[in-house]
Amino acid sequence: MPIYNKLVRDRIPEIISNNGQTMSVRTLEEEEYRAELRAKLKEETNEYLSARTDDEAIEELADVLELLHALSESHGITPAKLEEVRKHKAEKRGGFKERIYLIEVHDA
């Protein structure tokens, strides 16, 4: 019997039950939930970094995005508000589309 002790997607218990298996679960308190979201973000980021194909990378990026949505909500904002903050920062400081790699800065 595998022991996981980790945050899983909402429908995983349903999927496990539909496979004829039983499980133990509990609902996390808010502080614990945020800590587990952060741990899961590290896990999914590492899986993205280990992806060998574009398809694998896209699957992992979708997981990261789902976690970003959940984390934004845990901080009291919607994913739409998070997107507003992202857009504001991009307007003010730019994005990463131009692939600029800063090597060094010299004092004037």
Image (spheres, rainbow, N blue to C red):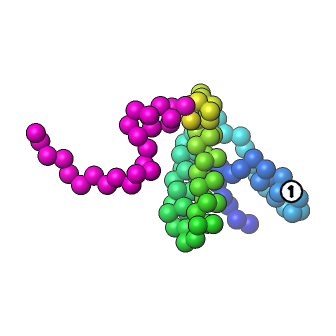
Which of these two is toward me, 55 or 32? Answer: 55
* Furthest residue in direction top, as rendered: 76
Residue in the picture at 52% in, 67% down: 50
Label 1: how many Cα within 10 Å (few below 14, some 14–19, many 20+): few
Residue in the picture at 47% in, 31% down: 88
Residue 90 on the magenta span: yes
Secondary structure under tag 1 reads helix
* Chain part drawn in magenta: 84-108
**Figure quadrant of residue 20:** bottom right
Prevailing secondary structure of the magenta residues: loop
Position above or below: 54 against 18? below
Residue labelled with disc 1: 17
Answer whether residue 32 is visible to the viewer in this image: no
Residue 64 on image: x %, y % = 58, 51
Which of these two is toward me, 41 or 84? Answer: 84
Residue 96 on image: x %, y % = 42, 49
Residue in the picture at 62% in, 33% down: 80
Which of these two is toward me, 44 or 89? Answer: 89
Task: Check disc 1 and give the amino acid type.
Answer: Ser
For the C terminus, the quadrant is top left
Which of these two is toward me, 9 or 32? Answer: 9
Residue 25 on image: x %, y % = 74, 48
27 left or right, relative to 77: right
For the N terminus, the quadrant is bottom right
Residue in the picture at 58% in, 71% down: 53
Residue 66 on image: x %, y % = 64, 47
**Figure quadrant of residue 81:** top right
